[in-house]
Amino acid sequence: MKTKKKNKSLFLLIYVLLISCLFSSIVNILPRKAYAEDTVYTSVLEDLQKDEKFNADNYVVDNESKSLKVIQIAESSSKELFVYVYQPCTTRDLTATEIRMSTLLGESYSPKDYKLSLIDSDGVFYKYKVDDFKVKDDVVRYYDLVCIFRKWNELIDDKPTGDNTISEVSYEIRQKWTACTMNDTVSYNCEETKVVEITEKYVGFVRISSGALWAISGSCDSHFIAFDTDYRIDELIEADVYFTATPICAYWKLIGNTWGYVNNDIYGVSSEHYIYIKEYDNETNHLSWFGGNKYVRDRIQSVDEFLKDEKISEENKKNFENKKWVLRFFESSYHDEGNYYYWTDVNDVSILRLKFRTAGDIYNLGVVDNKQSGDKKPVNPQESWWEKLIKLLTAIISTILLLTAVVLLSIFTPFLSVIWKIICCLAKGVWWVIKAPFSLFLDD
């Protein structure tokens, strides 16, 4: 009996094991949906230590530092791009947010900003993946790294000019990496490059009234950047500018004296923009067919030219001190319809590239520049409601007088024709009297 029980237990155990193996096989052959979480990345130190020249002891902790320094890049077999950063401070959150780089060189040089995702960190070493980027299939690939960004921190970062705000702070990289694939092996080479750094900056806009009779509240907002650099610029030839734009629809709430905002698929939705400006480009406002004020300005101006063209309030003139150049990079409309007001918020403005001439030499460089936003008020004084009312009444009276003159002219046209003929006859008579004596002598 005992032998039979042992045989039954052994058989049951074998049966359970067979069923388990069969179930596992079925599960393994079934298709599975892949998730991003399934991706397993190597650690930052594991990657860096593949380089025999890397020595972790050379990268010390410095909690007084607030900088970010790129020390290496790497491509993955799945065509991802990784950036390895030395962040000396370990007591603050100084996580990198974006990187500015160009994969094209020469005349096609065009830096763009790419968001970064943190993959791993170990002490002062950080590994990031460049989002929405795919490594090219070219044998030789270039990565011209201009600068890297982190969020602005009010405890350690300086405040900008005027009522401007900074969302992200930039740190220069000055590296051009060349990746070359030979015999399925990728090699990397790094060279130091030149960049131009923005040393002074002020973002704002000028509001110009359309002047139209029935739309005196309609205006054009001319958005600009006033700046200076660590290079002396004799002639500014080209510029690339990045910014975000958000269409706004708002109404004023009497209770609480504050704005109420409309949010839908259009209003309140932010979008990214890249603007390319050339030396002889200009901007103009959109006008109605009657009573409009024509507004034409060069997109690239010196600060002196800008202040000469615009009536800037005394309070805002000080914000242009220590700036040399102005870029007028974008225009948007401002108007109201009943209780609703419409305008465009422009934020995170940053210069990506500058092409300029200095001492006869032409430079085409990436720019180290923060993401900066201006005040929500125009820099030029605006008409009061009383001034607008006088303007409206003047326009109405002028229109009435003009229409009256046209009507009277149409009524009295026949009478005026007779008067004109009489004037012509009198003029001929006067002329005959004047020339008669001379005619007598000439006849003799």
Image (spheres, rainbow, N blue to C red):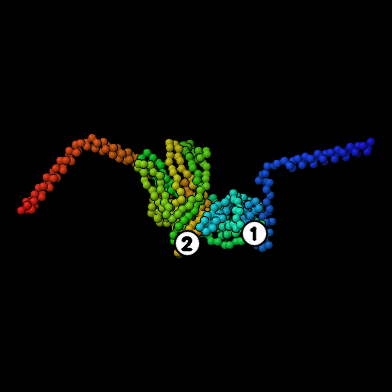
Task: Identify the residue at image location x=23%, y=35%.
Answer: 411
Find numbered disc 1 in the image and state the secondary structure of the residue it sits on. Answer: strand
What's under tag 2, amino acid-wise?
Ile
Q: Quadrant of residue 428?
A: top left
The reply to whether residue 34 is visible in this rendering is: yes
Residue 42 shown left or right of residue 352 in the figure = right
Neighbour tally class for label 2: few under 14, some 14-19, many 20 plus, Cα within 10 Å: some
Neighbour tally class for label 1: few under 14, some 14-19, many 20 plus, Cα within 10 Å: few
The reply to whether residue 86 is visible in this rendering is: no
Mark 1 and mark 2: Cα distance apart in space? 35 Å
| Percent of width and height locating residue 263 | 52, 39
Q: Quadrant of residue 334?
A: top left
Task: Identify the residue at image location x=50%, y=59%.
Answer: 364
Find numbered disc 2 in the image and state the secondary structure of the residue it sits on. Answer: strand
Query: In this figure, which residue is indicated by the disc labeled 2?
Result: 362
What's under tag 1, amino acid-wise?
Met
**Which residue, as the protein is rendered here, is positioned at the far right?**
1
Task: Identify the residue at image location x=81%, y=39%.
Answer: 19
Q: Which numbered disc covers residue 182?
A: 1
| Percent of width and height locating residue 134 | 60, 51
Residue 56 shown left or right of residue 441 in the figure = right
Closer to the observer: label 1 or label 2? 1
